[in-house]
Image (tube, grey):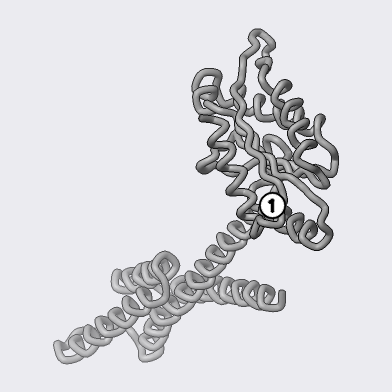
Amino acid sequence: MRERFSKNGKFVSYQVLFLLFIIILAMFAVGMPALSLIQALLLGWTLVISLTGIMFGLLTSLGMSLFSLFAFGSLLIWGMFAGWTISFSFTDIVIWMGLFLGAAVLTGLIHRLVSQTVAEHQEMVGKFDELVTIDEVTGFSNEKRLLFDLEEEFSRSRRTGIPFSLMLIEVLYLDSYYRLYGPKEGEYLLSSLSTILRSNTRLTDRKFRLDRGEQGSGTFAVILSNSHEEGAEVVVKKIEKLLSLHNLENDKKQVTLTIGFGISHYAEDVSDHLEMVQRAKQELEQYIQ
Protein backbone atom coordinates (compact mmCIF):
# COMPACT_ATOMS: atom_id res chain seq x y z
CA MET A 1 0.00 0.00 0.00
CA ARG A 2 2.83 2.40 0.87
CA GLU A 3 4.51 1.58 -2.44
CA ARG A 4 1.30 2.45 -4.28
CA PHE A 5 0.99 5.83 -2.51
CA SER A 6 4.66 6.48 -3.24
CA LYS A 7 4.16 5.89 -6.95
CA ASN A 8 1.05 8.06 -7.00
CA GLY A 9 3.01 10.79 -5.26
CA LYS A 10 5.79 10.58 -7.85
CA PHE A 11 3.26 10.74 -10.65
CA VAL A 12 1.65 13.87 -9.20
CA SER A 13 5.07 15.43 -8.63
CA TYR A 14 6.10 14.81 -12.23
CA GLN A 15 2.85 16.31 -13.46
CA VAL A 16 3.35 19.42 -11.30
CA LEU A 17 6.94 19.80 -12.51
CA PHE A 18 5.86 19.39 -16.11
CA LEU A 19 3.12 22.00 -15.62
CA LEU A 20 5.63 24.39 -14.08
CA PHE A 21 7.97 23.69 -16.96
CA ILE A 22 5.28 24.61 -19.50
CA ILE A 23 4.41 27.76 -17.53
CA ILE A 24 8.05 28.84 -17.36
CA LEU A 25 8.47 28.10 -21.05
CA ALA A 26 5.40 30.17 -21.88
CA MET A 27 6.48 33.05 -19.64
CA PHE A 28 9.94 32.95 -21.18
CA ALA A 29 8.43 33.10 -24.66
CA VAL A 30 5.91 35.83 -23.82
CA GLY A 31 8.52 37.89 -22.07
CA MET A 32 10.53 38.25 -25.26
CA PRO A 33 10.10 41.66 -26.82
CA ALA A 34 9.75 40.16 -30.30
CA LEU A 35 9.62 36.45 -31.09
CA SER A 36 12.05 35.99 -33.94
CA LEU A 37 11.94 33.08 -36.37
CA ILE A 38 14.86 31.36 -34.61
CA GLN A 39 13.22 31.77 -31.19
CA ALA A 40 9.92 30.41 -32.54
CA LEU A 41 11.77 27.41 -34.00
CA LEU A 42 13.54 26.77 -30.70
CA LEU A 43 10.24 26.98 -28.82
CA GLY A 44 8.56 24.60 -31.26
CA TRP A 45 11.49 22.18 -31.10
CA THR A 46 11.25 22.15 -27.29
CA LEU A 47 7.61 21.14 -27.59
CA VAL A 48 8.61 18.42 -30.07
CA ILE A 49 11.10 17.05 -27.55
CA SER A 50 8.35 17.09 -24.91
CA LEU A 51 5.92 15.18 -27.13
CA THR A 52 8.66 12.69 -28.02
CA GLY A 53 9.33 12.03 -24.34
CA ILE A 54 5.65 11.51 -23.56
CA MET A 55 5.09 9.20 -26.53
CA PHE A 56 8.35 7.25 -26.79
CA GLY A 57 10.05 7.50 -23.42
CA LEU A 58 13.12 8.85 -21.70
CA LEU A 59 15.88 7.36 -23.87
CA THR A 60 14.41 8.65 -27.12
CA SER A 61 13.74 12.13 -25.76
CA LEU A 62 17.23 12.31 -24.18
CA GLY A 63 18.77 11.28 -27.47
CA MET A 64 16.85 14.00 -29.26
CA SER A 65 17.74 16.50 -26.54
CA LEU A 66 21.47 15.72 -26.73
CA PHE A 67 21.35 16.00 -30.52
CA SER A 68 19.58 19.35 -30.13
CA LEU A 69 22.20 20.60 -27.68
CA PHE A 70 24.97 19.55 -30.04
CA ALA A 71 23.29 21.15 -33.05
CA PHE A 72 22.42 24.34 -31.16
CA GLY A 73 25.92 24.69 -29.74
CA SER A 74 27.52 23.96 -33.11
CA LEU A 75 25.41 26.62 -34.82
CA LEU A 76 26.35 29.19 -32.18
CA ILE A 77 30.07 28.42 -32.53
CA TRP A 78 29.83 28.41 -36.32
CA GLY A 79 27.98 31.72 -36.20
CA MET A 80 30.70 33.29 -34.09
CA PHE A 81 33.38 32.31 -36.62
CA ALA A 82 31.18 33.25 -39.57
CA GLY A 83 30.47 36.68 -38.16
CA TRP A 84 26.74 36.13 -37.59
CA THR A 85 24.90 38.56 -35.39
CA ILE A 86 23.78 36.46 -32.42
CA SER A 87 20.70 37.82 -30.67
CA PHE A 88 21.06 35.48 -27.70
CA SER A 89 22.69 36.46 -24.46
CA PHE A 90 24.65 33.95 -22.44
CA THR A 91 21.65 33.61 -20.10
CA ASP A 92 19.31 32.91 -23.03
CA ILE A 93 21.62 30.20 -24.34
CA VAL A 94 21.80 28.51 -20.92
CA ILE A 95 18.01 28.70 -20.56
CA TRP A 96 17.32 27.18 -23.97
CA MET A 97 19.79 24.37 -23.39
CA GLY A 98 18.25 23.76 -19.97
CA LEU A 99 14.79 23.69 -21.55
CA PHE A 100 15.91 21.08 -24.10
CA LEU A 101 17.30 18.84 -21.38
CA GLY A 102 14.50 19.49 -18.88
CA ALA A 103 11.79 18.74 -21.45
CA ALA A 104 13.41 15.41 -22.27
CA VAL A 105 13.89 14.33 -18.64
CA LEU A 106 10.48 15.40 -17.30
CA THR A 107 8.40 13.99 -20.14
CA GLY A 108 10.51 10.81 -20.22
CA LEU A 109 9.87 10.23 -16.52
CA ILE A 110 6.15 10.84 -17.00
CA HIS A 111 6.13 8.30 -19.84
CA ARG A 112 7.92 5.74 -17.67
CA LEU A 113 5.55 6.21 -14.74
CA VAL A 114 2.48 6.05 -16.97
CA SER A 115 3.79 2.86 -18.58
CA GLN A 116 4.37 1.29 -15.16
CA THR A 117 0.88 2.33 -14.05
CA VAL A 118 -0.70 0.80 -17.16
CA ALA A 119 1.28 -2.43 -16.71
CA GLU A 120 0.25 -2.66 -13.06
CA HIS A 121 -3.36 -2.02 -14.01
CA GLN A 122 -3.28 -4.81 -16.59
CA GLU A 123 -1.69 -7.12 -14.04
CA MET A 124 -4.37 -6.28 -11.49
CA VAL A 125 -7.10 -6.89 -14.08
CA GLY A 126 -5.56 -10.30 -14.84
CA LYS A 127 -5.43 -11.18 -11.14
CA PHE A 128 -9.00 -9.98 -10.67
CA ASP A 129 -10.18 -12.20 -13.54
CA GLU A 130 -8.48 -15.14 -11.84
CA LEU A 131 -10.22 -14.36 -8.56
CA VAL A 132 -13.66 -14.07 -10.13
CA THR A 133 -15.12 -17.54 -9.77
CA ILE A 134 -18.80 -16.93 -10.58
CA ASP A 135 -20.21 -17.60 -14.03
CA GLU A 136 -22.45 -14.69 -15.06
CA VAL A 137 -24.99 -16.73 -17.03
CA THR A 138 -25.67 -19.54 -14.56
CA GLY A 139 -24.55 -18.09 -11.25
CA PHE A 140 -22.46 -21.23 -10.67
CA SER A 141 -18.81 -21.25 -9.72
CA ASN A 142 -16.30 -21.83 -12.51
CA GLU A 143 -13.78 -24.60 -13.18
CA LYS A 144 -11.01 -23.02 -11.11
CA ARG A 145 -13.28 -23.08 -8.10
CA LEU A 146 -14.27 -26.66 -8.91
CA LEU A 147 -10.69 -27.89 -8.65
CA PHE A 148 -10.17 -26.04 -5.39
CA ASP A 149 -13.39 -27.35 -3.79
CA LEU A 150 -12.86 -30.85 -5.15
CA GLU A 151 -9.39 -31.04 -3.63
CA GLU A 152 -10.85 -29.89 -0.32
CA GLU A 153 -13.66 -32.48 -0.47
CA PHE A 154 -11.20 -35.22 -1.42
CA SER A 155 -8.96 -34.40 1.55
CA ARG A 156 -11.96 -34.43 3.87
CA SER A 157 -13.08 -37.84 2.62
CA ARG A 158 -9.53 -39.12 2.97
CA ARG A 159 -9.57 -38.12 6.64
CA THR A 160 -13.14 -39.11 7.56
CA GLY A 161 -14.01 -41.86 5.08
CA ILE A 162 -17.26 -40.08 4.13
CA PRO A 163 -17.97 -40.77 0.43
CA PHE A 164 -18.79 -38.23 -2.24
CA SER A 165 -19.28 -38.21 -6.00
CA LEU A 166 -18.40 -35.93 -8.88
CA MET A 167 -20.99 -35.62 -11.63
CA LEU A 168 -20.34 -34.03 -15.04
CA ILE A 169 -23.29 -33.03 -17.20
CA GLU A 170 -22.81 -31.92 -20.80
CA VAL A 171 -25.30 -30.46 -23.25
CA LEU A 172 -24.32 -32.03 -26.55
CA TYR A 173 -24.37 -30.11 -29.83
CA LEU A 174 -24.51 -26.79 -28.01
CA ASP A 175 -22.67 -25.03 -30.84
CA SER A 176 -25.35 -26.13 -33.27
CA TYR A 177 -28.01 -24.89 -30.85
CA TYR A 178 -26.34 -21.46 -30.74
CA ARG A 179 -26.16 -21.30 -34.54
CA LEU A 180 -29.78 -22.38 -34.92
CA TYR A 181 -31.45 -20.29 -32.22
CA GLY A 182 -28.94 -17.54 -31.51
CA PRO A 183 -26.83 -16.54 -28.48
CA LYS A 184 -29.79 -15.14 -26.54
CA GLU A 185 -31.62 -18.49 -26.63
CA GLY A 186 -28.32 -20.23 -25.87
CA GLU A 187 -27.85 -18.26 -22.68
CA TYR A 188 -31.49 -18.80 -21.76
CA LEU A 189 -30.95 -22.54 -22.20
CA LEU A 190 -27.92 -22.54 -19.88
CA SER A 191 -29.76 -20.42 -17.35
CA SER A 192 -32.75 -22.79 -17.44
CA LEU A 193 -30.52 -25.84 -17.00
CA SER A 194 -28.78 -24.21 -14.05
CA THR A 195 -32.18 -23.56 -12.45
CA ILE A 196 -33.11 -27.23 -12.85
CA LEU A 197 -29.82 -28.34 -11.33
CA ARG A 198 -30.18 -25.92 -8.46
CA SER A 199 -33.77 -27.05 -7.74
CA ASN A 200 -33.09 -30.77 -7.87
CA THR A 201 -29.89 -31.03 -5.86
CA ARG A 202 -29.16 -30.25 -2.24
CA LEU A 203 -27.84 -26.93 -1.04
CA THR A 204 -24.72 -28.75 0.12
CA ASP A 205 -24.13 -30.08 -3.41
CA ARG A 206 -21.83 -27.52 -5.04
CA LYS A 207 -22.50 -26.66 -8.68
CA PHE A 208 -20.08 -25.44 -11.34
CA ARG A 209 -19.99 -24.50 -14.99
CA LEU A 210 -16.78 -25.58 -16.67
CA ASP A 211 -14.73 -23.24 -18.81
CA ARG A 212 -14.57 -23.47 -22.56
CA GLY A 213 -12.29 -26.29 -23.47
CA GLU A 214 -12.46 -29.89 -24.53
CA GLN A 215 -15.74 -30.34 -22.66
CA GLY A 216 -17.27 -27.14 -24.07
CA SER A 217 -19.12 -24.33 -22.35
CA GLY A 218 -22.27 -26.42 -21.92
CA THR A 219 -20.67 -28.68 -19.33
CA PHE A 220 -21.70 -28.53 -15.69
CA ALA A 221 -20.21 -30.23 -12.67
CA VAL A 222 -21.79 -31.08 -9.33
CA ILE A 223 -19.98 -32.27 -6.21
CA LEU A 224 -22.43 -34.58 -4.46
CA SER A 225 -21.20 -34.48 -0.89
CA ASN A 226 -21.87 -37.41 1.45
CA SER A 227 -23.24 -39.42 -1.45
CA HIS A 228 -22.89 -43.12 -2.31
CA GLU A 229 -22.94 -44.51 -5.85
CA GLU A 230 -26.62 -45.45 -5.57
CA GLY A 231 -27.58 -41.92 -4.53
CA ALA A 232 -25.66 -40.43 -7.42
CA GLU A 233 -27.42 -42.72 -9.91
CA VAL A 234 -30.79 -41.59 -8.58
CA VAL A 235 -29.81 -37.95 -9.10
CA VAL A 236 -28.65 -38.68 -12.66
CA LYS A 237 -31.92 -40.34 -13.64
CA LYS A 238 -34.00 -37.53 -12.20
CA ILE A 239 -31.97 -34.77 -13.82
CA GLU A 240 -31.72 -36.56 -17.17
CA LYS A 241 -35.50 -36.68 -17.41
CA LEU A 242 -35.89 -33.01 -16.53
CA LEU A 243 -33.16 -31.81 -18.87
CA SER A 244 -34.22 -33.77 -21.94
CA LEU A 245 -36.92 -31.24 -22.97
CA HIS A 246 -36.53 -27.48 -23.13
CA ASN A 247 -38.99 -24.71 -23.97
CA LEU A 248 -37.59 -21.76 -25.89
CA GLU A 249 -37.75 -18.38 -24.21
CA ASN A 250 -40.65 -17.28 -26.41
CA ASP A 251 -42.53 -20.53 -25.58
CA LYS A 252 -43.23 -21.09 -29.27
CA LYS A 253 -41.29 -24.32 -29.52
CA GLN A 254 -40.09 -27.20 -27.38
CA VAL A 255 -36.80 -28.80 -28.29
CA THR A 256 -35.29 -32.13 -27.31
CA LEU A 257 -31.81 -32.00 -25.83
CA THR A 258 -29.14 -34.66 -25.79
CA ILE A 259 -27.48 -34.76 -22.39
CA GLY A 260 -24.34 -36.67 -21.45
CA PHE A 261 -23.32 -37.71 -17.93
CA GLY A 262 -20.07 -38.74 -16.37
CA ILE A 263 -19.71 -39.80 -12.72
CA SER A 264 -16.76 -40.69 -10.56
CA HIS A 265 -16.87 -41.72 -6.92
CA TYR A 266 -14.41 -41.35 -4.12
CA ALA A 267 -12.55 -44.58 -3.40
CA GLU A 268 -9.36 -45.61 -1.66
CA ASP A 269 -7.71 -46.50 -4.96
CA VAL A 270 -8.20 -42.97 -6.36
CA SER A 271 -4.91 -41.15 -5.97
CA ASP A 272 -6.16 -37.56 -5.91
CA HIS A 273 -8.97 -35.21 -6.96
CA LEU A 274 -7.55 -34.81 -10.47
CA GLU A 275 -7.94 -38.53 -11.07
CA MET A 276 -11.60 -38.19 -10.11
CA VAL A 277 -12.00 -35.51 -12.76
CA GLN A 278 -10.28 -37.70 -15.32
CA ARG A 279 -12.48 -40.69 -14.52
CA ALA A 280 -15.62 -38.58 -14.79
CA LYS A 281 -14.49 -37.22 -18.17
CA GLN A 282 -13.75 -40.71 -19.45
CA GLU A 283 -17.20 -41.91 -18.44
CA LEU A 284 -18.73 -38.83 -20.05
CA GLU A 285 -16.95 -39.61 -23.31
CA GLN A 286 -18.18 -43.21 -23.18
CA TYR A 287 -21.71 -42.01 -22.40
CA ILE A 288 -21.63 -39.73 -25.46
CA GLN A 289 -20.40 -42.53 -27.73
Instruction: Please say whether residue 31 is visible from this viewpoint.
Output: no
| 112 to 196, vertically: above or below | below
Q: Position of residue 281 (x, y in %)?
A: 58, 42
Q: Position of residue 241 (x, y in %)?
A: 72, 21
Taking the spot 50% from the left edge, 42% from the top edge, the residue there is 214
Quick check: 50 left or right of 113? left
Taking the spot 57% from the left edge, 63% from the top edge, the residue there is 123
Quick check: 183 left or right of 228? left
Q: Residue furthest left?
A: 82
| 120 to 100, vertically: above or below | above
Q: Position of residue 285 (x, y in %)?
A: 54, 36
**For residue 168, which quarter of the picture?**
top right
Q: How many marks?
A: 1
Quick check: 250 left or right of 27? right
Q: Residue furthest front?
A: 269
Instruction: Please say whether residue 45 is visible from this viewpoint.
Output: yes
**For residue 195, which quarter of the picture?**
top right
Q: Position of residue 23 (x, y in %)?
A: 53, 72
Amino acid at circle 1 = Arg
Q: Foreground residue, 101 or 250?
A: 250
Taking the spot 36% from the left edge, 86% from the top edge, the residue there is 93
Residue, disc 1: 145
Secondary structure, mark 1, is helix
Q: Foreground residue, 106 or 124?
A: 124
Q: Foreground residue, 7 or 211?
A: 211
